[in-house]
Amino acid sequence: MSAAAGRPPRGSPPRAERSFHLSMQHDDATLHLRLTGALEWGCVGRVEAAVDQASQVRASRVVVDLRELDFLDLAGLRALLRANDRARAERFELIVVRPRRQVRRIFTLTRAGKELTMVDRAPGSDHPG
């Protein structure tokens, strides 16, 4: 049995210490979502509900800022890919601001980064990525 079985990836905090926060800001035609902490299966519904807001506020662009994300599991990645599919179907633009290197790896390994529009800085942001 592997010593790593059932444990979080090396360098990630123990499950009890992980938290997730989503903040939302709407300006002009852009809905900004900033995700911090650990995006795991238990938080996916919050991300999906936030993307629902794009239709309600008639946003033509949704920016999902992952720069402060510490952990992303496959359920979180699938939520981002579903949001991208929804953006195409509902004709709004989805832009993902690249996460830290430790989180970025899942996008490379799964090639999901090729499906998403990923940028280093949020459009209109003066905060370096």
Image (cartoon, rainbow, N blue to C red):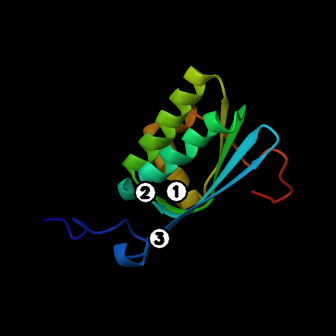
Q: In this view, which residue lies farthest toward the front?
A: 56
Circle 3: element type: loop
> What distance separates the C-alpha of mark 2 from that of mark 3?
9 Å
Q: Residues within 10 Å of mark 2 (few under 14, many from 20)?
A: some
Disc number lying in front (2 or 1): 2
Residue at horizontal 69 percent and vertical 39 percent from the top = 57
Kindly identify the amino acid type of the residue bearing the numbered disc 3: Ser
> Which mark identifies residue 19?
3
Q: Nearer the viewer, residue 118 or 10?
A: 118
Q: Quadrant of the C terminus?
A: bottom right
Q: Quadrant of the N terminus?
A: bottom left
- Is residue 109 shown to the viewer in this render? no
Q: Locate residue 21 relative to residue 29 in the image: left or right.
A: left
Residue beneath disc 1: 103
Kindly identify the amino acid type of the residue bearing the numbered disc 1: Val
Image position of 100 with respect to 15: above or below: above
Residue 67 percent coordinates (x, y): 65, 58
Image position of 61 with respect to 128: above or below: above
Q: Earlier in the sequence, mark 1 or mark 3?
A: 3
Residue beneath disc 2: 43
Residue at horizontal 36 percent and vertical 77 percent from the top = 16
Circle 2: element type: helix
